[in-house]
Image: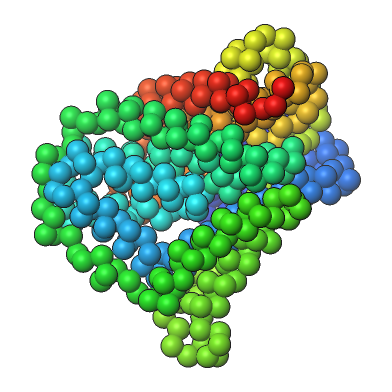
Amino acid sequence: MLGLAIFIITLVLVIWQPKNLGIGWSALGGAAAALATGVVQLSDVAVVWHIVWDATFTFVALIVISLILDEAGFFSWSARHIARWGNGRGHRLFPLIVLLGAVIAAVFANDGAALLLTPIVIAILVRLEFSAPAALAFIIATGFVADTASLPLVISNLVNIVSANFFEVPFDRYAAVMVPVDLVSIGATLAVLWLAFGRKLPKRYPVNEIDPPASAIVDPYVFRAALPVLAALLVAYFVLAPWHVPFCLVTGAGALILLAIAGRWWRGGQGAIVPLAPVMRNAPWQIVLFSIGMYLVVYGLGQAGLTHYGATVLDWLGRQNAIVATLGTGFLSAFVASVMNNLPSTLVGALAIKQAHVPEVTRELMIYANVIGNDLGPKFTPIGSLATLLWLHVLANKGYRIGWGQYMKVGLVLTPPVLLASLFALAIWLPLITSP
């Protein structure tokens, strides 16, 4: 009960975010309370840090890359091209925006998609003078796809990195399993969004109101380096997978290359256009504190019995067929993520799967089902993921306020079919590519 009380208070502070108290300091406060009361021991700090350090610094490096490319105009350039490809038809622009969000989420993680794409889409909507219902459709779609399309690669979500590292899943194996599942998730996302908002989309919009894509480019050096650097990163992830090279080293190298190009380090900084100081200040350093703090609180909660209860449920699911085990694990993870936040929920699920006595094939299904549940399940509630909280914060800063009740009306309707389709795809696909 003490562990649960500390967790609830910590979670409330993380969500509430009191003035001058970031999510990192709130989580560290909870960790300090857990240590002081004996819920966790000092030795547990090293255990938790071993679990989260790679994921944390990979995430920070990805956001640094994202912020540099954003300052250079890369994402604005992409969005303007998408708007022009829509050819003045709202029913064509809508799926294109969703697909752009899916690509950004896959490469720059769900938080990157929420942080970068949302203000760009809002700027386009304002320029095109879309009606309020039509603007809401695009805004909801942008926030929704940030999480539902964050399945394909290990780097696409902090949840994925933590899970892959915990169970030592190689980058190539993860992609082989989850890329097809992600395609199903994107298809289901498009379908539910279209059913919900298709009638609210404008039939036509003025293409001539969209600024030329080239005018969005601020730093041509960084812009030209973007695709080669991203392609090199993707190749490096696959090539280095057999040696289990930490993801943060590869991603950090990519971030350093872009920092060097943006800062014109070979010229001593002369001619630099992108302001690197604000970029580095805006990097999510609070996530480093949050990771060690929140995961330590949750680790203590797991030690107090939550993990045991989870393992008991998974044992029962494991005795059923593959479909039941996969759907049960995924929906259970989704429920826990929606009320607990998906980052601590991921660790609880991983610890429970490790304790569960199930066959190896079933265990692998549960590992990926736990990822899907924690990637997609947070869309049930606004507190389910940091990406959603970040998205709501960005919207509020732009003058668009979405209440929790309004959000949950959408989330509770749109999320279940996408989650169900993705879990079914996993249950069918994984056995097909697994050697007997």
Above or below residue 102? Residue 317 is: above
* Residue that appears at 59% across and 14% down: 323
- 52 or 368: nearer the viewer: 368
Would residue 70 be found to the left or right of residue 237 on screen?
left
Q: Position of residue 265 (x, y in %)?
A: 55, 84
Q: Position of residue 332 (x, y in %)?
A: 60, 21
Above or below residue 433? Residue 71 is: below
Above or below residue 104? Residue 6 is: above
Q: Position of residue 57 (x, y in %)?
A: 66, 57
* Residue that appears at 19% across and 38% down: 91
Tell me which corner region of the image, top left, top right, bottom left or bottom right, holds residue 375: top right
Q: Disc count in the image?
A: 0
- 363 or 9: nearer the viewer: 363
- 281 or 415: nearer the viewer: 415
Q: Is residue 286 visible?
A: no
Query: Please, which residue is most extreme toward the top here?
Result: 320
Q: Position of residue 352 (x, y in %)?
A: 74, 26
Q: Is residue 179 visible?
A: yes
* Residue that appears at 72% across and 22% down: 436
